[in-house]
């Protein structure tokens, strides 16, 4: 989840900047309060909650056998960090934010929205992929178009040489 890593990096960079800035002010006599954290606070406050979300969604997909619309994949989770909503997570991350909501209740498809309501988990965001046999064509449509155009060129080239 590269967007999540960017979010974490920028928040850590801000913390480092504040620490360095407070050290510079400390020399000049100004004081700055920093939050005392233990060695495991980053693991407990940042990594574990994100891992919990990923673990829950991996459990939901039932080894790839569940319907694709019933669980969030990495694109759905990344999409959260594309918007301003990720700033509601705060720093350190607020475990009550809608990104971390876990529940076995799943909203019906006609009630899906971008906002999680009540105690329900955050649903899939924008696009629910429906897998069909035609998905094979849709995935490789540019390749099929190239093959058709190449076939036409070969046919026209051979036709011109015959004349």
Image (cartoon, rainbow, N blue to C red):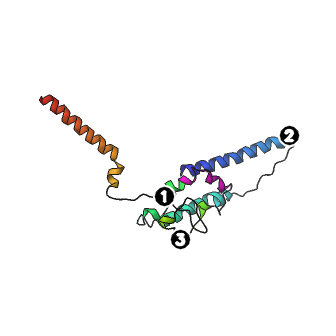
Q: Where is residue 33 drawn, in percent x and y?
A: 81, 51
Residue 96 is inside the magenta segment: yes
Labels 2, 3: front one:
3
Question: Could you tell which of marks 1 and 3 lies nearer the N-terminus?
Answer: 1
Residue matched to label 3: 105
Quadrant assignment, res 150: top left
Asked whether 131 or 24 is in front, the reply is: 131
Q: Where is residue 82 drawn, in percent x and y?
A: 57, 49
Q: CA distance from mark 1 to mark 3?
A: 17 Å
- Spot the residue most to the left: 162
Callout 3 environment at 10 Å: few (<14), some (14 to 19), or many (20+)?
A: few
Q: Residue at x 32, y 51 (%)?
A: 137
Asked if the residue under mark 3 is in contact with the one under mark 2, i.e. CB atoms within 8 Å, the reply is no
Q: Which residues are magenta?
A: 79-97
Question: Could you tell which of marks 2 and 3 lies nearer the N-terminus?
Answer: 2
| Rendered view: 87 above or below 123 | above
Q: CA distance from mark 2 to mark 3?
A: 56 Å
Residue 162 is inside the magenta segment: no
Q: Residue at x 71, y 48 (%)?
A: 15
Asked whether 99 or 112 is in front, the reply is: 112
Q: CA distance from mark 1 to mark 2?
A: 50 Å
Callout 1 environment at 10 Å: few (<14), some (14 to 19), or many (20+)?
A: some
The disc at residue 73 is 1
Q: Residue at x 83, y 44 (%)?
A: 26
Labels 1, 3: front one:
3
Question: Could you tell which of marks 1 and 2 lies nearer the N-terminus?
Answer: 2
Residue matched to label 2: 28
């Amino acid at each position: 989840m590269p967007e999540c890593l960017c979010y974490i990096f920028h928040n850590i960079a801000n913390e480092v900047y504040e620490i360095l800035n407070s050290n510079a002010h400390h020399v000049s006599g100004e004081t700055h309060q920093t939050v005392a954290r233990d060695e495991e606070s980053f693991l407990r406050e940042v990594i574990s909650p994100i891992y919990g979300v990923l673990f829950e969604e991996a459990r939901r997909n039932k080894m790839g056998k569940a319907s694709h619309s019933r669980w969030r994949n990495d694109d759905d989770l990344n999409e959260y960090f594309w918007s301003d909503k990720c700033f509601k997570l705060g720093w350190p991350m607020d475990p009550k934010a809608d990104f971390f909501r876990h529940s076995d209740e799943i909203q019906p498809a006609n009630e899906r929205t971008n906002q999680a309501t009540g105690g329900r988990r955050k649903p899939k965001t924008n696009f629910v992929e429906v897998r069909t046999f035609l998905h094979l064509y849709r995935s490789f449509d540019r390749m099929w178009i190239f093959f058709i155009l190449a076939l036409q060129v070969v046919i026209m080239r051979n036709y011109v040489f015959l004349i």
